[in-house]
Amino acid sequence: MIIRYAVLLLALFAVVIFCCPSLSSAPAQIPPQRRYDQQIFPQKTVLLSAEAGGLVTSLPFNPQDFVKKDDLLVQLDSDLVDIEIERYQAQIDMDTGIQKAEILLKFRRESLTIAEKLYSIVLERTDDPNNDIRVGSWKELQEAQQLFEDAELEDTRARLALKDLHLSLRRFQKNKEQLDIRAPWDGVIVKFSSLPDIQSVVQSRQVEAGEMVQAGQPVIALMKVDTLKTVIQLPVAQLPRVSLNQSARVTVQGFDNEPMEGRVSYINPKVTAGATVNVEVAFANPPVFNDQAPPGVYRYRFRPGMSAAVELIFGN
């Protein structure tokens, strides 16, 4: 009898489970979708301008080429500057003004010393008050003093003239340095057309060899991509939990299994109209090619313009 009732209860329980499957198990938890809604930007972009006007004679690199710090990017014609440098250097090498002035000054100093001694003898003699023996006179002492002062002035003029030559030489050497535009850091050359946010400032056409450029004219653009950044918007209420150098996790779209460690690099002090604050998160861009990669080949894993998901890591 007991066995019959047990079988009946089990059968009834099976019917209930079959009719009401929601009672048998909890609904499956669907993991939240990662939102790749943050755009990736280069760490910085710079427009390099000509400090002096001139003729472009060399552009060693092309857009998409990677360059190292201090690499020569643009060279302007330096023929006229080289001529002036050689001229001033020759004048300095052949200048003898200081040597002549020093010799004359030494002679005038010795002559003044002799005149002073002779005149002192006149003052000390008591047996020849009228200076009939004619040892030295006040007039001769004054003439020696004047000649010495003239020699001092000539020495000063010679030194100033040589200093002026050195300053002129340095000025033209500086002008020549301004004709060479070098990379301020490692980066990739980009076209002006790749920078839509500054199209109102520069022309979209690239400068080419053989063209004349004016002082202050942008001639080449360089983008730093070994470190990238993205900007997230945080509600003001969460701002007290965020600090500079705080850890973050950046996952680039298409690279879900390669989250990158990031850091808060900047917190905008201004609050937006939506009561949020823009926070920059920087992260390293791993290289995939070494320095031996062919010109024009992108050497890093991630590119500016990609999308990423960013998670700030908070403590307990």
Image (cartoon, rainbow, N blue to C red):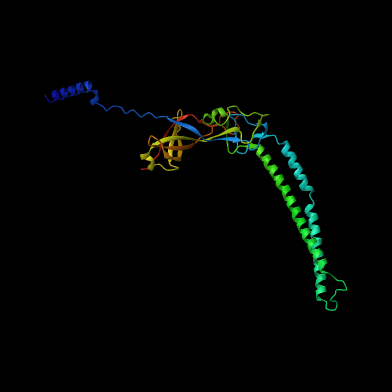
Tell me the quadrant of the picture where the C terminus can be found.
Answer: top left
Q: Residue furthest left?
A: 1
Residue 13 drawn above or below residue 273:
above
251, 60: nearer the viewer: 60
Q: Quadrant of residue 274?
A: top left
Q: How many marks?
A: 0
Image position of 60 (left or right of 126): left
The x and y percentages for residue 302 are 50, 31
68 is higher (above) or lower (below) than 296: below
Q: Indicate the quadrant where residue 111 lies.
A: bottom right
User: Residue at horizontal 20%, vertical 22%?
Assistant: 14
**Horizontal and vertical percent for residue 134?**
87, 71
Q: Residue furthest bottom?
A: 127
Along the viewing direction, whichever of 198 and 298 lies nearer the viewer: 198
Q: Quadrant of the N terminus?
A: top left
Q: Nearer the viewer, residue 218 or 116?
A: 116
Q: Position of residue 234 (x, y in %)?
A: 39, 37
Question: Left or right of 92: which side holds 21?
Answer: left
- Residue 58 at x, y percent in the picture: 67, 32
The quarter of the displayed image where residue 261 is located: top left
- Considering every residue shown, the one lying at the far front of the view is 130
Q: Residue at x 24, y 23 (%)?
A: 21
Q: Above or below — where is 194 with respect to 132? A: above
